[in-house]
Image (cartoon, rainbow, N blue to C red):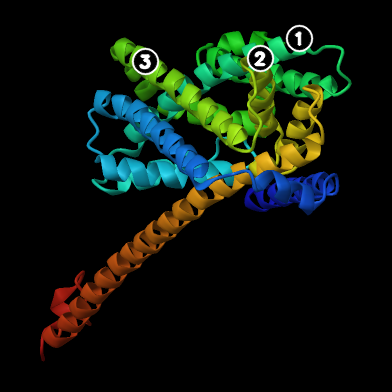
Amino acid sequence: MKFMKGKISFLISLVIGCIVFGYALTKVDFVSIKSVWQALSFKTIGLVLIAYLIAFVLAILRWRIFIKKQGVQVSFKQMILARLVGNAFNYLTPIALAGGESFKVIVAAEEHKESYKKVTATVVVEELVHFAVLGLFIILGTAYSLIRYINEPQIGVFAILFVILIFTTIILATLWFGLSKADLEKRALNPWIAKLQSISFIKKLETTIHSFKKEVNLVFVNGKRAVINASLLAIGDVLVNAFMWWILLAGMGYKLSFPQYIVVWSLLYLAFLVPVPAALGSLELGQIAAFGILGFHDPQAIAMAFSLTNRGITVFFLVIGLLIALYYWIKITLDKYLTVAVKSTQNFFKFLGTIAKGDFFVDSDHPEDNKEL
């Protein structure tokens, strides 16, 4: 029943996303988008891909810090495969760039059958560090944009997404510092925490936090230096990603100043707070609002060309991630069935051996009844 509810919720969010995406497409004709794309060169695309790969490597190095701290043996190659799979499912799920972590753990732990709890702890800590750094940049960028462009008519999009961001941050902070650390007795006295606990999703998340709390705490307590190094890598990751999209816009003929780019970049990430897969529609409408706020001529064409190119690059790596996931799904399924098949075959031959020995019909409780007359 819970599985069906999850599927229905996903399908509803997907349908809503498709409708909004379709609405965004009606705002611009393909000829206008094509004219923006024509300014792109292979050199620009190459630079964007190089920046993407650099950011990807920084993310792997950030995760590797915690992998080593936990003493888990996972090769660099396996981490790359796991990250590609995780990123693919993150993009497909409607949970704000998070949702593929379990797939990441499965692939990472598959190589040496490492402890899933230890690997999960490294993923949790790495994501916490990444989102803390990214969230800080987004909050600062959004706050600046709201103050700088408060009189623009499209600023309402910013305001709505900023409220969602603050609400999400409060919920996550409450979950971590409230539910994961408060004693049961104290929770019962706190009506706010009690109300949160009544939500099934919160209960499930709380259980997850507690199941990995020990391993996660070990990483934080024994790896303070590791957290600092990972935070520096996360800052590098954010800056490289920001530079990557600035290169793309410059290649399209739009060289934005730093204050202008803050608006575009902030809305790029705020769009993923809307709970629809791949930020369908919300990314496009957000970018239309961003370029409208900045006063660009034909903001719809720029926004759609930018967001669709963004999606094209992401989907390229998404397909690679899904193919890797398919390989591991087949491998794990086959291993499982082969194990069962081997065990069943062994049991079958044991059964035949028992018959051959004539012991199959022997009553072990009363062996004297089975003696030959």
Residue 234 occupies quadrant = top left
The numbered disc on residue 148 is 1
Q: Is residue 25 above or below residue 340?
A: above
Q: Amino acid at mark 3?
A: Val
Q: Which residue is mark 3?
A: 227
Q: In the picture, which quadrant includes the C terminus?
A: bottom left
Sequence order check: which comes first, mark 2 or mark 3?
3
Pick whichever, 185 or 90, lies toward us.
Answer: 90
Q: Amino acid at mark 2?
A: Pro
What is the distance, in whole Å, between disc 1 and disc 2 at their CAs? 9 Å
Q: Amino acid at mark 1?
A: Arg
Residue at the (81%, 44%) spot, across then down: 24
Pick whichever, 225 or 35, lies toward us.
Answer: 35
Q: Nearer the viewer, mark 1 or mark 3?
A: 1
For label 1, the SS is helix
Residue at the (51%, 40%) spot, across then down: 44
Q: Is residue 353 left or right of residue 33?
A: left
* Crowd tier of the residue under label 3, counting other residues whose Cα lies within 10 Å: few below 14, some 14–19, many 20 or above: many
Q: Is residue 339 above or below residue 34?
A: below
What is the distance, in whole Å, between disc 1 and disc 3 at their CAs? 34 Å
Q: Which residue is mark 2?
A: 259
The numbered disc on residue 335 is none
Pick whichever, 359 or 16, lies toward us.
Answer: 16
Sequence order check: which comes first, mark 1 or mark 3?
1
